[in-house]
Image (cartoon, rainbow, N blue to C red):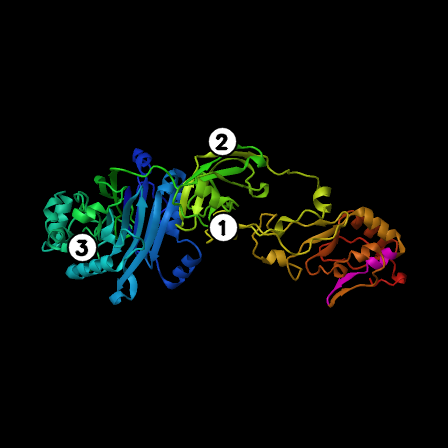
Amino acid sequence: ITVVTWNVGTAMPPNDVTSLLHLNTGETNDVDMIAIGLQEVNSKINKRLKDALFTDQWSELFMDVLSPFHFILVSTVRMQGVILLVFAKYYHLPFLQDIQTDCTRTGLGGYWGNKGGVSVRLSIFGHMVCFLNCHLPAHLEKAEQRKEDFATILHMQQFEGRVANGILDHDLVFWFGDLNFRIESLDICFVKYAIDSNVLSQLWEKDQLNIAKSTWPVLRGFQEGPLNFPPTFKFDVGTNKYDSSAKKRKPAWTDRILWKIKSPSTGLEAGRRRPSQGVLSVSQLCYCSHMEYTVSDHKPVVAIFAVQFASKVDKPLVEIYVADEWSRPEQAVVRYKMAVGFHRSSWDWIGLYRVGFRHPKDYVSYVWARSDDGDRCLENQLCAQVMFSEEVLPKGNGEYILGYYSNTSSSIAGVTEPFQISLPRSEEGSSSTDSSGSSSEEDDSTLVLLAPKSRSPSPGKMKRHRSRSPSLAKFQGLILRPSSRDRGMSRSPSPQSRRGLPRDIPTIHVPQKELGQAADSPEGSSFYQTVQEQGGPRCVSTDSPLARADPWNLGLLPALRLEMIDQALGQRQRENMDQGYYPCRRISPTSPPGCRTSPKEGCSP
């Protein structure tokens, strides 16, 4: 288990955190879980409103960096600028159950969340573990206040369930954060001398937290590794230089990571212990700071622990069976078996995830686990079966994972090993006549596209909806000008897209074949006298078939405008003008001149 704490000082995330998470070393292969505690994340009003709609930038950064290493966000909790994120390898997810979060405000007498603690507790292979991220009061003289606030957090945070209701009731507790303990008695010159001379042990006995561990009953049993790294506060931002401002704050180990193992129970309590609970041991493999990160006045601190359980749960609540490869839609059959005692819900679902997904709601598609005989299968320990429909399956080749999401526990209760999906992509490059003339196919612009990484509260939000707008009537040769999305342009309106038009609208092109027929017919001239004037369009006649295709008659305007396709008509216009004929007004400012008539025929020049 890797634990990270960092007071980011309202800074923007750095570009790279791989070294902070030890992702560029061999240690990553052995790490099963990562807990990241942040303090002083920017929580101004405008930033909080944005983060309420979208995930904050720090959480996005860590998910982006960790997902390629198969770490999935198990749980997260935020209290203003204090954030806690817990990640685990995807194959451990079925063994992480009973996940709950809590937070306690201690700022301004308990009314403000700039100080306090946030926690995530969960059962890991049957053992109750709690991660507690705290930001305690600052300044040298506030040691007693820090003690009282920590005691308040321990007292206030209570969890539901039959076991481990309080933080210290858990089998293992990790306590970390900006605890703000300072170095007493020694002056700043001696502290800096000890740092420069690398004799940090001379500062340990004056560290307030080291003193408190032996004198405060509330800290009894908490352990910490040796402080063999320089004090992590306070630095000039952008440098590795300690505070050079007028305040010249004394360097201190404010950012700490501690752990506590629950004392073995005796007597009557021991007889009531859970069968899965046994003796566990914790070894600290690494405890260090990272001086290379300079975006804050604090340096991040990392600890890596090896946690050994005497016993563990090795069978998931839901076992999922699937073929090694889906090469045809009819192979997308999922069989699953639920363990005895599993609390099944009609709102459970099975998600299809691409390998490298970021969190349980980051699915490609899903199917409800609502087998008709689900209750009978659970009672008789039989396999239930569901099937993914062809339209929700991803096309192309790729590696995927299936996960059974339990609505009762808000966690994944079973996963598969990665398997291959190799389905043919939809036919591309069809002829322009088929794609433009068919009314049975909808334009892509009518689809509501939702990102596959949606964090919607329920799978239903991920359904792909089609527009209820009526499709265009079938007109031979009508070609819709591509929308701005198809042209690779921004969907926001731009001045260029509005030039000469009241709004950005597609265009209907009329092919030359129908154009020639209309020009030669008596009704043709009346159709081409449907002109765009300053006061609005003026329809002279609607007798011809082409006139009935007028968007005004179809009720489509202002969504469409008519435009003639044959650019060669410009040459015909010049020839006609030489013979005394004058062109009528063009249907739109951008259309080529295409009809001819003489003044005596009644068309205004």
Q: Gap between marks 2 and 1, in whole Å? A: 25 Å
The one nearer the camera, 55 or 309, is: 309
Indicate the quadrant where residue 329 lies: top right
Residue shown at 79% from the left, 60% from the top: 530
| Disc number placed over residue 459 in the picture, else none | 1
On screen, residue 360 versus residue 249, left or right, reads: right
Q: Provide residue 597's location: percent of width, then percent of height.
A: 86, 57
Q: Provide residue 83's location: percent of width, then percent of height.
A: 33, 54
Amino acid type shown at disc 1: Pro
Residue projecting furthest to the bottom: 535
The one nearer the camera, 242 or 421, is: 421
Q: Secondary structure at mark 1?
A: helix
Image quadrant containing the N terminus: top left
| Disc number placed over residue 324 in the picture, else none | 2
Query: For residue 533: magenta?
Result: yes
| Disc number placed over residue 196 in the picture, else none | none
Earlier along the polypeptide chain: callout 2 or callout 3?
A: 3
Query: For residue 285: magenta?
Result: no
Is residue 559 visible in the rendered structure shown here? yes
Residue shown at 28% from the left, 47% from the top: 128
Q: Secondary structure at mark 2?
A: loop
Of the two numbered discs 2 and 3 in the rendering, the one whose residue sits closer to the viewer: 2
Q: Provide residue 494's location: percent of width, then percent of height.
A: 58, 57
Q: Gap between marks 3 and 1, in whole Å? A: 45 Å
Q: Mark 3 = which residue?
A: 181
Span colored in magenta = 523-534
Q: Provide residue 464's location: percent of width, then percent of height.
A: 57, 50
Amino acid type shown at disc 2: Asp
Amino acid type shown at disc 3: Phe
